[in-house]
Image (cartoon, coloured by chain):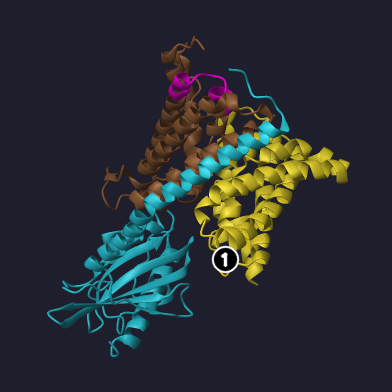
């Protein structure tokens, strides 16, 4: 089989064929992965909710409330958890753009009295080994059971109560700010739900 | 103010080569002489800015409305490849002196991942606009130029230095790049 | 076409004599950018291996149908297609890795290893040899990235593949996880690699 000649017609046709085939292939794979992609994103949220909230028996994802805020780029999401028709906890997302590499997004679970139940990290691009240690137990445990009305959500350097991560004060600040944003929203909505 | 922050962040704090690792190939490859590295920087500034403008418009006004944003990678690389060709042809006609200065570097730019990288990163800018994306691309190409020219001037001195045999060539270059990157780490927290 | 290539040598060359990272210095951006941990390095390596094998197969299949003047754009489209496939699949099934690798996934397109092998090998050889070539080169890349990632993770975080080898509060060289550490670790690994291969090959 000889090599195709460099005529204009051959060039156009061969590129066209390749482009069309690849376009169809990508469209097909995109359709195939659409559902798993959405599922993966949802699953992440559901997993986070299960961790940050006390045991619940409703489906908080169904009744999510979205609130627009100037402080965050997308909207703040509020999930309410019930067990035996009693409100047992509220999970609020909070985010900050002031991380070392931009966005830090958290899901914070509050008990109805405002105590922090637990925190999960939804999104962060911090420096591996430094800022990413915010996902570690050692950092997270200082928030658990604390009530932000008395517990100052600022790193100790800024006069707050939080031990910053070693070498990652900026990440820690962004983390604290996200929790504060979520708490402020929690206070605003707790009575209305 | 916001634009000054973008500029400082792109040139010093998040330098595209030394802390984001984009455009390492030309950084290591085209840095033996200060004069060639200036030529390369000029070509990158030119192509990166135009490529970002075109890809930004393509993404916002064609791909997203058509729901084809998954074709981002493939269409961007095609735009860049075609653009490099066009720039080459146009420069040859319009400004032969400039073509003489930049010509040899242009084909290399297609596979310079900094160009594709910046085009993709520019989509994720906060409150993005065409103006901001363009400025972002220019700021990043200045960061590229700074890193490349600094590195080339160190390498020119390195030729005269007495280096252990095993470290000659690639390893010593990488070490120098590491030290440069370390110096740039000092800008952390500036913005 | 009769293959006169010694397939064993064809396979081994990518791992040792023409190792893309330590010898040819190709694909440096992902090499330095994602190797903050052994797992990330490994993941990036495998993603690249996949694209490399697929693009080598397709390029060597269609090599006679493409006029030589437009072969580079044609190769780029083929590569970009598989990169996008990898991107979608990772996002759907390994979202954790997808987030970690970030922008470096679309940048596999401009990884010079892939275009380099398409141009230098697959466009001149039969499918079988091209597959072997891609596997050799790809494995060389996987191994290099995993070693670099493991070294940086060990020195910077005291662990390998997330398996903690030091005590929780031990002081580690954080610098190795930060950008400068990538250059420095790769510099010394290259020295060691050169030393070892020069001993083997005499």
Tell me if residue C162 is in the magenta stretch: no
Percent x, y of residue B96: 87, 41
**Element type at mark 1:** loop
| Residue A28 left/right relative to C158 | right
- Magenta span covers which residues? C119-133
Which chain's colour is brown?
Answer: C
Q: Residue furthest left?
A: A84
- What is the quadrant of residue B188 in the picture? bottom right
Which chain's colour is cyan?
Answer: A
Viewport quadrant of the N terminus of chain A:
top right
Which chain's colour is yellow?
Answer: B
Identify the subunit bearing mark 1. Answer: B
- The vertical placement of A75 against C124, above or below, is below
Percent x, y of residue C34: 45, 45
Residue under label 1, please give it: B191
> Which residue shows up at 40% across the image and 31% down it?
C143
Question: How would you classify the magenta stretch by its main secondary structure?
Answer: helix
């Amino acid at each position: 089989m000889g090599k195709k000649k460099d005529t204009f017609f051959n060039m156009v046709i061969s590129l066209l064929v390749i482009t069309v085939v690849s376009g169809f292939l990508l469209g097909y794979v995109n359709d195939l992965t659409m559902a798993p992609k959405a599922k993966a994103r949802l699953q992440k949220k559901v997993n986070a909710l299960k961790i940050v909230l006390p045991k619940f028996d409703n489906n908080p994802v169904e009744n999510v409330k979205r609130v627009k805020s100037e402080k965050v780029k997308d909207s703040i999401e509020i999930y309410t958890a019930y067990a035996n028709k009693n409100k047992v906890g509220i999970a609020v997302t909070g985010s900050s753009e002031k991380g070392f590499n931009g966005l830090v997004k958290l899901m914070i679970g509050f008990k109805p009295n405002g105590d922090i139940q637990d925190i999960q990290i939804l999104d962060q691009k911090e420096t591996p080994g430094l800022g990413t240690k915010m996902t570690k137990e050692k950092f997270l445990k200082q928030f658990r059971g604390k009530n932000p009305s008395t517990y100052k959500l600022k790193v100790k350097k800024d006069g707050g109560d939080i031990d910053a991560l070693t070498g990652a004060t900026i990440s820690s600040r962004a983390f604290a700010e996200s929790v504060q944003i979520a708490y402020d929203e929690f206070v605003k909505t707790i009575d209305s739900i | 103010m916001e634009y000054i922050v973008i500029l400082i962040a792109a040139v010093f704090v998040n330098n595209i080569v030394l802390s984001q690792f984009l455009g390492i190939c030309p950084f290591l490859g085209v840095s033996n002489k200060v004069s060639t590295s200036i030529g390369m920087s000029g070509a990158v500034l030119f192509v990166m800015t135009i490529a970002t403008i075109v890809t930004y418009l393509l993404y916002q006004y064609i791909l997203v409305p058509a729901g084809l944003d998954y074709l981002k990678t493939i269409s961007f690389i095609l735009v860049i490849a075609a653009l490099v060709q066009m720039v080459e042809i146009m420069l040859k006609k319009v400004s032969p002196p400039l073509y003489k200065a930049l010509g040899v570097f242009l084909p290399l730019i297609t596979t310079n991942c900094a160009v594709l990288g910046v085009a993709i990163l520019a989509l994720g800018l906060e409150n993005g606009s065409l103006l901001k994306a363009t400025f972002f691309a220019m700021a990043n190409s200045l960061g590229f130029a700074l890193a490349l020219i600094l590195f080339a001037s160190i390498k020119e001195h390195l030729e005269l230095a007495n280096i252990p045999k095993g470290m000659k060539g690639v390893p010593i270059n990488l070490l120098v790049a590491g030290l440069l990157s370390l110096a740039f780490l000092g800008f952390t927290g500036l913005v | 076409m009769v293959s006169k290539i010694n397939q064993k040598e064809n396979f081994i060359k990518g791992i040792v004599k023409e190792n893309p990272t330590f010898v040819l210095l190709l694909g440096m951006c992902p090499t330095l950018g994602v190797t903050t941990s052994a797992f990330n390095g490994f993941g990036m390596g495998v993603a690249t291996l996949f694209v490399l094998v697929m693009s080598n197969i397709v390029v060597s299949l269609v090599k006679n149908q493409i006029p030589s003047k437009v072969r580079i754009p044609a190769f780029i489209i083929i590569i970009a297609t598989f990169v996008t496939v990898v991107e979608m699949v990772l996002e759907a099934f390994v979202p954790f890795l997808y987030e970690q690798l970030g922008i470096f996934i679309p940048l596999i397109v401009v990884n010079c290893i892939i275009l380099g092998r398409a141009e230098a090998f697959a466009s001149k050889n039969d499918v079988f040899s091209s597959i072997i070539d891609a596997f050799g080169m790809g494995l060389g890349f996987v191994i290099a990235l995993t070693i670099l990632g493991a070294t940086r993770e060990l020195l910077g975080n005291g662990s390998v593949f997330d398996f903690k080898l030091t005590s929780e509060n031990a002081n580690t060289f954080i610098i190795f996880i930060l950008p400068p550490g990538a250059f420095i670790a790769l510099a010394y690994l290259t020295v060691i690699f050169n030393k070892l291969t020069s001993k083997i090959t005499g």
